[in-house]
Amino acid sequence: MTIVTYEKGDNLLYTLRAGKAPFHDIMQFMTVALTEHNNLNDKKREYFFRLSLKLREALRLHKEAGLWARVGNAERDWGNVTEHCLVEVARVGVLADMLGLSHEMRDKLLRAAALHDVHKKTEKDMMNKAATNGGSVWTAYDEAASISTQNLHDVGIDPVTVRLAGAAGHGVLHEVEHMLDAPELSEEDIAFLALHYIDDITMGTDWVAPAQVREDGTLQNALDFKMGEGNEGRIKPGSTYDLLNQAGSDHFGGDTTWRHELVVGRRVEEKLASLINAQTPQLSIDPMRLPEIIDNGIRDAIDKI
């Protein structure tokens, strides 16, 4: 089950691209139209439309980055990236509240989540070009990340939001490990870990799968499902992402990229749960259940609309 629906006419990006009216006029139309219905799916769409309205300036950058451009007769193209970002916005908002982040930091974190993949098209184009030409996919990824960071600075995004927008993925694993080993964390560091974790457990726009018991009796959760053996099984051998995954062994002591991201992600998960439990002891959160708890927070917010 997806969080953001894809039916023609329901899809956020399809609606945004359907006409030539100014962005804010389209958003107002969608908000008014969707308040007439009260079933779960309509509430869900309304919830995400409200999020997109609050983050409309960040979403403009998605359009400018080519994420809403049509390719041939396709309807979705890169638009799924925007929907993925909105799902991460929703999740990180719930997690920010659980962590007790300040209103100012929460706002920066949500904006960062909306922007974390804004240059995904550039990143993938550069990586594919490197793979085709026999270059380093790892280097191409790093160069794309630097371009994204500079572009966000150039359009006036504040430095904290820019830093948080770069919190996702394998490129910051050493920085994340350094934070986890530090005696204290700043609020900005906690926000950084929060977005890193949310990206670790988010696959497309799907709700997280419930934790499951392995044959050996141990639990596996959304982090395992994305970063564990299942993820590597979905990568086509010899593909760009397979090359990126294998290249991790040169940087992470022999671990593949996603194997190391799973190891570090588990530490982040435990740290975040510890911070939440220290602040609100009555919750007594099991780290392995954290993804489900976050999504239940989204469901509760949707139900209250």
Image (cartoon, grey):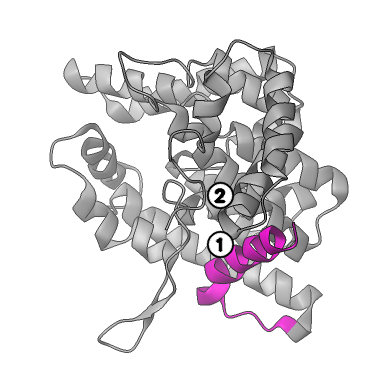
User: Disc 2, disc 1: CB below 8 Å?
Assistant: yes
Q: Which residues are magenta?
A: 283-305
Question: Relative to residue 207, is residue 190 drawn left or right?
Answer: right
Residue 192, visible in the rendered structure: no
x and y percentages locating residue 145 in the rendered image: 49, 26
Give the class, few, some or many, for how many residues have Cα within 10 Å of label 2's Cα (few <14, many ≥20): many
Question: Relative to residue 2, is residue 32 drawn left or right?
Answer: right
Q: Is residue 4 above or below residue 266?
A: above
Amino acid marked by disc 2: His
- The residue nearer to you, when weighing 26 against 210, is 26
Q: Is residue 233 above or below residue 128?
A: below
Tell me the element at label 1. helix
Residue 196 numbered mark, or none: 2
Mark 2–mark 1 Cα distance, whole angstroms, equals 8 Å
Give the class, few, some or many, for how many residues have Cα within 10 Å of label 1's Cα (few <14, many ≥20): many
Residue that badge 1 annotates: 268
User: For residue 9: magenta?
Assistant: no
Amino acid marked by disc 1: Val
Tell me the element at label 2. helix
- The residue nearer to you, when weighing 179 against 80, is 80
Q: Which quadrant, please, contains the N terminus?
A: bottom left
Residue pictured at 69% horizontal, 13% vertical: 22
x and y percentages locating residue 208 in the rendered image: 46, 62
